[in-house]
Image (cartoon, grey):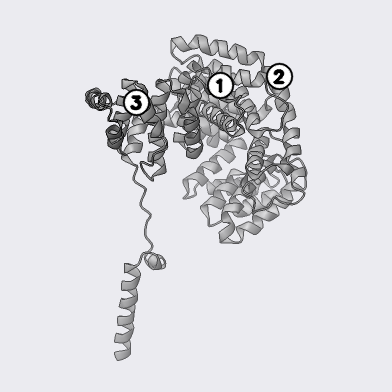
Amino acid sequence: MIYGAFILVVACGLFWLAYRHPRPRRWLLPTRAMPRAVAAVDRQHRHLQAGGLLGESTCERTKAHFRELLDAGRADLVERELHAGLDFAVQVRALTDLGTPAAARLLERQLTRVLTTDPVERAWYWVDVASGLRRLNFAEALPAVLHCAEVAGDSPQGAVLAAEAVCFANFSTLLRHPSRTLSRRALRALVAAARAARTGTVDAAPLIRAGLGDTLAELTSRADLCADPWLTSALIEAERHFRRLGHWARFVPPDVRALAARQEVRLGATADHRLNWLGGAPGRLLARFPVAGADEQGAALRCLFDLRADVTKLFPYLPDRREPWWTDAVRALQWARSSVVGPVLAGQAARFARKTRHHGRAAVVLATLRGHACYEVERVLVRNATATNPALRHAAIGSLGWWPPFDANHVVRTLRVARTDSDTETRSAAVSALARLGERSALAEVTAGLSSEEPAIRQGAAGRIATEELSWAWPDLETAAESTDPDTALAAAEALECLRERLFGFAR
């Protein structure tokens, strides 16, 4: 009896300790991760990016208050009132409307102030300030805007910042700036802005007004034969921009159509030079790679992936896992032409999949295997299609169906089982793989999204067709590209151009 009471007391004590301390109790009482609350500032700026407006009366009151302070020479008080929160966008708008040199200098200083530690909020504040400075034509602020765009990186806010930088009147001059750092930042912003216009992250019309096509054409005409991965990315985006201007011209405002047509003509005049330049780019990048820095090597590998170049000779052995560009290197090996690469990568994927701590790397290698049609690869993919880790299942399923299966019955049976998986991404990948193999029901499931009543579903279906290279759905995309809904038509047109590039490269 005493022994039983002792066990009960110990069990209750352990239960209490496990309940009171979150980390130790995960094994006993697992908790469900709560979704991160979307910041109010982020919601506000997404509303503004979608065409929302600020309160005019509030802006007018703030402008009048700031005018009194600036006229009295109290810029320090104005700066003290600029603080993080929903009012910041209103305050920046008020200073922009004032348009005085003092207001412009005040705005420029906000690019270096630490208003918040949250990276999303901070980037949105930079967007507010950059937009105001661009509207005030305050050219001196462009280097600071470019720095902010680089810090924001690949986030949606970084794309918007890059677009704001490109719209500065003096942007094109920075591409010829003697400072290599500043010129490189300008090239990165140019690439980010062009990509954001393609993906719909930013509106293409302001970029066309700012002469994005002219800038890309000028960059093409004076591009030297050098192994610069950032210049290579810019010329790749120039070719993509040229191929999409005709689609965009249907939906941009009437005053922009003439500009779009003129920029298309100018980009067309440099097309031969651009394609010849890009044709020799892989050889130059491969030759430069061994002596380049880590940042340049990563950028070069991303360019080589876009150009579908064979990078096998850079890696006589597998890429070093300690390198920061390891993921880019493995991804680029997707286009390796050697018959040895597939079995070697399959073996590495199998080794990574055995240890939980390497599952992230295993998923990267499994995704790369879609480019290597051999029995060893298929066997590893089918085996990992039933892994306990959803990331492994998704990567393995997503790499099936890119070539006629060696064991068709086994592969199709695996895909049909995965079609009922509890993980949404895995189910979607299984349907796409079956559609690539020509299963009508799977293809119909994908293309049904193009006729949905929800615009977001139609756009998502178009993007999925391009990403999964479902060439069977080409006619459906052409029909969607003729839609009267601008968002659907542009998403379908982008998908068509992506499919065309992936099937035929940059050849005409």
Q: In the figure, 24 relative to 227: above or below?
A: below
478 or 181, which lies in front?
Answer: 181
| Circle 3 crowding by C-alpha within 10 Å: few under 14, some 14–19, many from 20 | many
* Quadrant of the image occupied by residue 5: bottom left
Q: Mark 1 points at which residue?
A: 172
Q: Which amino acid does label 1 sit on?
A: Ser
Tag on residue 326?
none
Residue 384 rendering spot, x and y as whole percentages: 60, 54
How crowded is the residue under tag 1: few (<14 C-alpha within 10 Å), some, or many (20+)?
Answer: many
Task: Looking at the picture, tell me which residue is in the foreground, 61 or 43.
Answer: 61
Spot the residue most to the bottom. Answer: 2
Could you say which quadrant of the image residue 270 lies in? top right
Can you give x and y, in whole percent of width and height, for residue 178 in the image? Answer: 62, 28
SS of the residue under disc 1: helix
Above/below status of 470 relative to 409: above
Quadrant occupied by the C terminus: top right
| First along the sequence among labels 1 and 3 | 3
The number of discs equals: 3
- Residue assigned mark 2: 273
Residue 322, position as x, y percentages in the image: 64, 54
Q: How far apart are marks 1 and 2 (CA)?
A: 20 Å
First in sequence, mark 1 or 2: give its number.
1
- Callout 2, which amino acid? His
Q: Name the residue under label 3.
A: 103
- Nearer to us of marks 3 and 2 is 3
Does residue 221 appear in this view? yes
| Label 3 to label 2: alpha-carbon separation | 45 Å
